[in-house]
Image (cartoon, grey):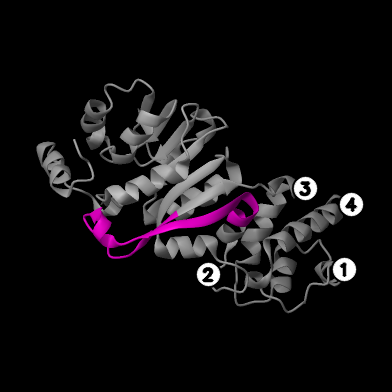
Amino acid sequence: MNLTSRSELIEILQKNNIFLKKSLGQNFLVDKNILKKIIDALEISKEDTILEVGCGVGTLTLELAKRSKRVIGVEIDKRFKPILENLLKDYPNTEIIFEDIMKIDLSKIVTPPYKLAGNLPYYISGSFLGEYFQKGPYASLMVIMLQKEMAERLTSSPGNKKYSPLSILLHITYSYEVISKVPPSCFFPAPEVESVILRLKLNPKLDKIHNKELFFKLLKESFSQRRKFLLNNLQRAFPEIDWKTLFTELNIDSKIRAEDLSPEDYITLSNKAFALWKD
């Protein structure tokens, strides 16, 4: 069975009376070269546990099962259950959980060290990654496929209009590289936009944060009104802290906006604020 064959994929879907749902972002990879790039980027060993987000018909799942110690897949659409069960019947090292990934506590299904892979649909990618970066448990390596727009949001740098709390959370948790751009023609059905494969390697700076709850809230409030100065946003959200003095002490321009401050400066600002908050 060649799951990267468009004709075979269509035959499998028709045989199981499955009509793909655009609302779930069901665009399946039908390019063996792109599949190989994902596999190679994961650097899989026989000792690896891999969490796959969104199994679909099992194109990637099968390749992971062949190469790793254990595969835990999460798939929201139960219609794919008979296809996956048949495909993976000879691989007892696989476990497929038919549930919404946003309703799962990842710490209940996987423990580090592990790797994470998946083609993340646009409708959940931002919320899933935002939750993941804050709560973990963190994969040592992630290889994920995202729509180009989301990938740009995620990897944007200070000064960029797309720079956001999500960008900052990525930069303090992982280093990243772009593995490949993926044109719409590599999927069935073809989406309207280009996708990007990102490889994220754990490089945590989270340990430098003295109070994560305050840090995450500070990020949210900093970007709550992007057109306003960062100082104004923080004064409104945390009136008990003398932000003017803090900005002067850290040599931060009082007229800077949230999108212009680096991830490292957000950590420093949060830690200084926490010290004052405690006092």
| Residue 250: x %, y % from top left | 83, 67
**Mark 4 vs mark 2, CA separation in Å:** 35 Å
Question: As shown in the figure, which amino acid type bears the numbered disc 3?
Answer: His
**Mark 2 vs mark 1, CA separation in Å:** 28 Å
Secondary structure state at the residue bearing disc 1: helix
Is there a contact, CB below 8 Å, between mark 4 and mark 1? no
* Sequence-first tag of 2 and 1: 2
* Sequence-first tag of 4 and 1: 1
Residue 170 is covered by the magenta coloring: yes
Residue 265 is covered by the magenta coloring: no
Stretch in magenta: 169-197
Secondary structure state at the residue bearing disc 3: loop
Find residue 162 and name its label: 2
* Residue pictured at 18% horizontal, 46% vertical: 5
Q: Quadrant of residue 248?
A: bottom right
Question: As shown in the figure, which amino acid type bears the numbered disc 2?
Answer: Lys
Secondary structure state at the residue bearing disc 2: loop
* Sequence-first tag of 2 and 3: 2
Q: Quadrant of residue 83?
A: top left
The mark lying in front, picked from 4 and 2, is: 2
Secondary structure state at the residue bearing disc 4: loop
